[in-house]
Amino acid sequence: MHARESNPGESRRLALNIRRKIIEMSASPTGVHIGGSISISDLLAVLYAEVLRRPSDREALHRDHLILSKGQASAALYAALASTGAIPEAECATYAQAGSRLGGHPMKRLPGVDFSTGALGHGLPIGLGVALAGRRFGHDKRSFVILGDGELQEGANWEAAMAASHHGADNLTAIVDRNEWQISGRTEDCLSLEPLADKWSSFGWRTLTIDGHDHDQIRTALGKPSEAGRPTAVIARTVKAHLVPGLHDTKRSHSATLDRPARERALRALEEVRT
Amino acid sequence: MNPTLAEPRTASEVLDHVWENRSAVPARDAYTMTLLALARSNPSIACLSIDMDLQDHFSGELHRQFVDLGIAEQNTIGVAAGMTVSADQVFANGMSPFTIARAFEQIKIDVAGADLPIKIVATHAGLASGHYGPTHHSLEDIGAVRMLPNMAVVAPIDAYQTAQATAALARTPGPAYLRLGKQGTPSPFERRPEFELGRAQWLRDPGRVVFIATAPRPNLVAAEAARELGERGITAGHLNMHTVKPLDREAVREAAAHAEVVVTIEDHRAVGGLGGAVCEATAETGGPPVKRIGVPDVHYDLVGDEGHLLDRAGINADNAVARALEVVS
């Protein structure tokens, strides 16, 4: 299977669409993890527009897999799935409602979701298993795992990090959403992660640090095949609730409900960024 | 590595070999031989090892199907889940106390919740590594795993049944926990028995007392206690509940219909495991009193081998007889 072609216009359109849908879902009275959903919007946009090969085709053996280990950002994933035809667009309006398939964390029974996630620290081991399975059983697979930065405080990630380089899983890419916040505050105040790039490098990973909202940098980091014999860690510097008025880079953006005026303000701000 | 394990055999040749040596072959070796035979015949079976010294068995062409993930239970169970995107079956091998307890959340969500074809095979269950101390006891595993949806829980009685169960589990689409001990135990069988997951075995017909046991040592206790009661003129049956989940409710109903008392025996906490499962079943269907024999609700920091620790916990024939005699006379 060939790599997909770069299409900058499409990734930008998709990013805007994902953000819009997240804002719309944030009407939910249960609250939406808006900050950490918005912060991965550009990453998801480039992945779905240009990188992932048949990500929602469960029947295919030769395909790529995306595991959203930080499952609390489910709204962003649903937005991407709805924007790419894996689920109906109108379904986003059911987010977190009784009987919906769209829970606060993604469940495997939803098309486009290979593994239920949300318990932090599960995604990287699973993603490693996918990568190893591709190699061992002759299936052309790349495995991408989106991790929260706070999530890296879970030890299972480092078990997987050690194993991935030991087994030369060069078809595995871990993308760290480095927005620097967790529930209690700044990651560096709660349990510091830095020097984060050095940690991944010392575990044997090819490590890249990029601006997680710059599509050119994202496509360069994710689009080309990894270095032979080593997994890739992409530390994507992002901003929680990026450009959402009143929530941009704040602790309180972790989970919030936006009333109609707030949603309208947010949507207007997104339009301004586009133009 | 025991070189006889690596001799190329088919699964049915392994069964023949294990049957002929059923009281000499440890259950874990019967398992390994069967797994190797299955892996040779199905190149889509994967085997993961949590530092279980299995790598030498998976040499040559089998090497592709094998991954050692080191001493890392959580990662291994997650990797098992991930590998099911390509593998038909994933056998994840570890030691019971660590694999079940430490990776419980991964087992709950990524294995049981996802209903994937993953077989968690763990040795050192119960008090099998008794002298290592309570860090190495696995006395909560049956209870923990049987609460999880989709999971089967199987504790074979001997090496032959282990080989049978391994082959049977490789044909099931869902997840399971195969619970193994460490040492060899004598086989109770004189003729080659049938095996079906979820169908308990009557090793002695039901009587006024029925002993229900799971795993090798508790079944030895049950056999001895039933024999002893028989010598006293009290009919006693013995049911081997090799599959604790799904529980063979029909067999429990049959036991309850005959017996004035049911005594459960397990190398597990007296709560939550086989005894708990039998009580749940009889509470709903009605039946005689159930006496549970297992490890009491105390931190079990005694030193001794498996036999000594089982004995100290009252998992012995004298206690089984005494518990039965509380009801029958």
Image (cartoon, coloured by chain):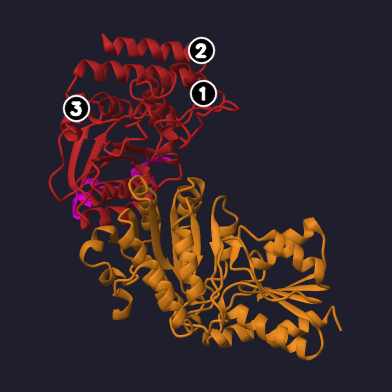
Question: Residue A170: percent from the left, percent from the top?
Answer: 19, 47
Helix, strand or loop at mark 1 = loop
Q: Which residue is mark 1?
A: A257
Q: Calculate the distance from the C-alpha at mark 3 to the C-alpha at mark 2.
A: 38 Å
User: Do marks 3 and 2 share a subunit?
Assistant: yes
Residue type pointed to by label 1: Thr
Q: Calculate the distance from the C-alpha at mark 1 to the C-alpha at mark 3.
A: 37 Å
The front one of B87 and A111 is: B87
Chain hosting mark 2: A
Question: Residue B19: percent from the left, percent from the top?
Answer: 46, 78
Label 3 with label 2: CB-CB less than 8 Å: no
Question: Is residue A152 in the magenta section?
Answer: no
Q: Please identify which colour was used for chain B in the image.
A: orange
Question: Residue A110: percent from the left, percent from the top?
Answer: 46, 32
**Quadrant (top left, top right, bottom left, bottom right) of the C terminus of chain B:** bottom right
The front one of A129 and A173 is: A129
Q: Which residue is mark 2?
A: A260
The front one of B48 and B308 is: B48
User: Do marks 1 and 3 share a subunit?
Assistant: yes
Helix, strand or loop at mark 2 = helix
**Quadrant (top left, top right, bottom left, bottom right) of the N terminus of chain B:** bottom left
Q: Give the residues drawn in magenta, as a range.
A: A185-205
Q: Which residue is mark 3?
A: A4
Q: Please identify which colour was used for chain A in the image.
A: red
Residue type pointed to by label 2: Arg
Could you tell whether B55 is left or right of A122 in the image? left
